[in-house]
Image (spheres, rainbow, N blue to C red):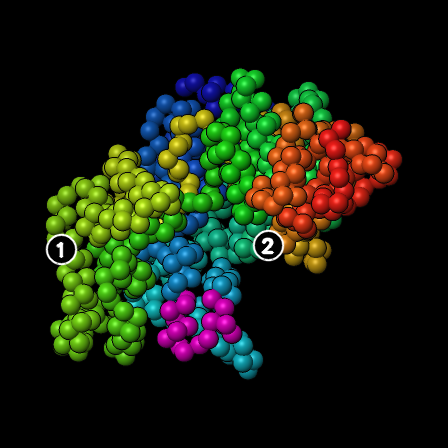
Amino acid sequence: MDITPIIGPLNPAQREAVTSPTPALLVLAGAGSGKTRVLVHRIAWLMQMEGISPHGILAVTFTNKAASEMRGRIEQLLNISAQGLWVGTFHGLAHRLLRRHAKEAGLPDAFQILDSDDQHRLIRRVLKSLDLDEARWPPRQVQWFINAHKEEGRRARHLPESYDPYQKQMQRIYLAYEETCERSGLVDFAELLLRAHEFLRDTPEVLEHYQRRFHHVLVDEFQDTNRIQYAWLRLLTQERENLFVVGDDDQSIYSWRGAKVENLHRFQKDYPSHRLIRLEQNYRSTSNILNAANALIANNEGRLGKTLWTEGGIGEPISVYAAFNEQDEAYFVAERIKQWAQEGNARRDAAILYRSNAQSRQFEEKFLAMGIPYRVYGGLRFFERAEIKDALAYLRLIANRHDDPSFERVVNTPVRGIGAKTIDLIRDVARAERCSLWQAAEALCRDSALPARARTPLTGFLQLIEAMARDTAEHTLWEQVQHVVLASGLRAHYEKEKGEQAEARIENLDELINAARQFEYEPQLDMELSKLDQFLSHAALEAGENQSDEFEDCVQLMTLHAAKGLEFDLVFIVGLEEGLFPSLQSLEEPGRLEEERRLCYVGITRAKRKLFLTYAETRRLYGKETYPRPSRFLREIPSEYLQEVRMRGSIGRPMMSSHVSSGVSERASVYKLGQRVRHAKFGEGVILQYEGEGNQARVQVNFAEAGTKWLMLAYANLQPA
Ligand code: ATP
Ligand code: MG
């Protein structure tokens, strides 16, 4: 048997981990040291050398994308199919388990998954049914409360009785929310894990079955597991201590979502037979990049401590760019990407990482304007766009009439004359009868309890759904989707609407049919479920991870959080400003500041060859002009690794404000940021900023002699120099 492909491309420490005879193992190592590689090779080793069947292995990755890459790598290493292998995210795996055992776990066969948006909507409905004011009980806060408790494994009934009126009310809402989900067969993300855990814990014969089945359980990014995930792993592996984990305490960036870096310590206590292996060689980055990352993270306290070195060359220094404002920042990045592509590099090897999702818009706009193909990874998700959610809601109603959120979403979308009053009445009946909205609507139509004006469109809606279900029962998935997009009237609705936005929506709807078509050819999970139900789960779970332009050569845009585990030749970390990164909230709590620093460490260590760090001197944030200071993280990187850069040909950038009209400001549009100008008294200078319009227009000029001054454009009488 040739084992060279499996252990050949590994260093001695990695090899030790991969071939370890003890199944319990912790690989604790810094970024880019090959942890994920070790995990993949370990699985291949177990299958090849220890004769473990793919069915006997459970592997947990952080994203669905990582899971499919892992499967692909294993198949490539062994040259066999890894079909039976259970590899996926915690949520994906819990979902798979619950699908298989829906009944035993107390769920209807066709239970539907609520994504965060659906959950939000449902909570609003619950608040309404309890007669609570959203202003006092903000739905987002309720959502956070519920999810945080679920992630800790606590149901509403587990919460201690409280005399605090706030707590008491929150518990009441939580309870009502749980009841609604139960009644409609709805499962939110946190519920997937909680339910899977409770189910295994309370069903010994099933637990034993899986304990026997999975000879090895392996987890990537272990530092970011939360309490319920750990408990789940523990159930499966406590008997045989067959848990293999890799992680890095310096990359723990999800504590705000309940992740517990302490799980690294718990593992060491709970699995006494474990071995600890450290990896110290980084294979990813140049030494400039790696040293900068090491120096930055050294500012954190209470680390487990690791050494990391590289044989990679020194590489280029890290470039730091100070932009005038956020538009200038985007322009700078776009220029560099253009240059990068002109030099013959692939755009997909370049990534732009930002702290907050909203930052992507500037870059998107600039890229669109300059014709640079890009892809937002995990952000503006296809399956989260309104028209897609509408179409999916129809499909979900076809699959399960009692899906209340879907009913609410489309009962009057597109508008068919069902008024708010009627909908309120349906809700009242549903609440009184403890039945679904669908059943309530049926009863109202049947009993002629509604005036004809309201009854006719409502009956029409119920019949429409029934007809859709009947007419497509024998069709393939994509035909079903196509039929729904047309028969629901959604497409016609947007066709009437006209305009760019409507066009984009139509394109999206058409793309949904494509997605269904593509889905037909994908390997399926081994479960007895209709194609439609599988597709709906896929839509809820994979939102955003598979955008359509996968094959086009696109620059990748994503949050720093989403970049975990990935690597790129060229990386831009943008918006390095106090209050943005580190974020405003984190400045108040030392613990959170350290988490921001880890996030920065994650960002820096994504870069293989070249890293840019940028910040803006002024930025519009939450609708206000701000003048942030550069991020402390820039100061924490020793200057020997850094190099300030300027824009090539910095003259000629457009002014921020282009909608100038009056006589005076007509002149303003003649000036550009960065342009050299002359003033009768102050001499020569460079335009730094511009604000206001008309007679109020002002410019900030940095004069060689006189320093920086704000001048009213109407009176300054500036001349181009
Ligand atoms: P992160 O902490 O960011 O998740 P990681 O520790 O999981 O990083 P990998 O992604 O597995 O690191 O590896 C980083 C890079 O180094 C990858 O491109 C990988 O292929 C390469 N690599 C890992 N080990 C070796 C090795 N022994 N020889 C050559 N290249 C290696
Ligand atoms: Mg990794």
SS category of the residue bearing label 1: helix
Of residue 456 and residue 563, the one placed in the foreground of this image is: 456
The answer for how far apart the CA atoms under marks 2 and 1 are is 48 Å
Residue bearing the label numbered 1: 467
Q: Residue at x 42, y 45 (%)?
A: 381
Of residue 558 and residue 596, the one placed in the foreground of this image is: 558
Of residue 184 and residue 577, the one placed in the foreground of this image is: 577
* Residue that extends furthest to the right in the rendered view of this protein: 705
Residue 80 position in % (x across, y down): 34, 26
SS category of the residue bearing label 2: loop
Residue 495 position in % (x across, y down): 27, 46
Of residue 59 and residue 409, the one placed in the foreground of this image is: 409
Tell me if residue 133 is in the magenta stretch: yes
Q: Is mark 2 within 8 Å of ligand 1?
A: no
Q: Which mark is residue 623?
A: 2
Image quadrant for the C terminus?
top right
